Image (cartoon, grey):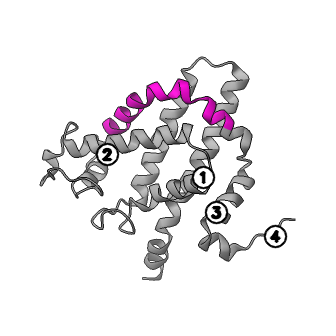
Amino acid sequence: MISINEERLESDLGYRFQYLAAFMGFGADDIATIHAAAPAIAPLVPTLVNAVYDKLHQYDATWRHFLPRQSGYDGAVPHTLAEVTPDHEMIQYRKQHLGRYLAALVTRPYDGKMVGYLDMVGKMHTPKAGSAELNVPLVQMNALLGFVADALTSTILSLGLEREHEVRTLRAFNKLLWLQNDLINRHYQDAAVAATAA
């Protein structure tokens, strides 16, 4: 039986990621499979990004989070939800971020820097990083990641890969997105504990 320091899971990001990766069986073969998918997936990133933003635009509960100034964005900020059109420059800025994120998943090495980046993806949607005004509820983050997971699955299934390769690719991305899910959820734990105590 492997002994796990559970307190360290909450304080040491690298340790947490290593534990989760080992538990899920996410290893070098999965990373190689994800990287091998880059030439096929990279050209489809703009389509994936547009699909995500089309979905976000369908609901006020998700679209309202584009009203506050986004971290790093210096342009004009909309004042009402009606002004946050899909072609608004702030939405275009956010689309670029999502595009870079999807590209990073299939190109970057899964080292400590990448783990930190995946963790920041979760943190930046809370007041703990980026914009203090931005506080996306966990339910919306779960909805978004679920949609992204399904969109990636659909994309992979559309590539016409040989069956064994297709299965390996689907499984590798599935594990990766569960790792990402944990690195989003962990930034909501304090709020959940506070709500339970109240």
**Viewer-closest of 112 and 99:** 112
Determine the CA span between mark 1 and mark 2. 22 Å
Earlier residue among tags 1 and 4 = 4
Q: CA distance from mark 4 to mark 3?
A: 16 Å
Q: Is residue 76 above or below residue 131?
A: above
Determine contact: label 1, label 2, CB under 8 Å.
no
State which quadrant residue 128 falls in: bottom left
Circle 3 residue: 14
Above/below status of 172 relative to 65: above
Circle 3/circle 2 CB separation < 8 Å: no
Q: Which residue is under mark 2?
A: 94
Q: Residues within 10 Å of mark 4 (few under 14, many from 20)?
A: few
Helix, strand or loop at label 4? It is loop
Image quadrant in which the C terminus is located: bottom left
Image disc number at residue 179: 1
Say which element carries label 3: helix
Q: Earlier in the sequence, mark 1 or mark 2?
A: 2
Q: Determine which residue is flagged by label 4.
A: 3
Q: Which residues are magenta?
A: 32-55
Q: Nearer the viewer, mark 1 or mark 2?
A: 2
Q: CA distance from mark 4 to mark 2?
A: 41 Å
Tell which circle, 3 or 2, labels the residue nearer the N-terminal end: 3
**N-term-proximal mark, 3 vs 1:** 3
In the image, what residue type sits under mark 3?
Gly
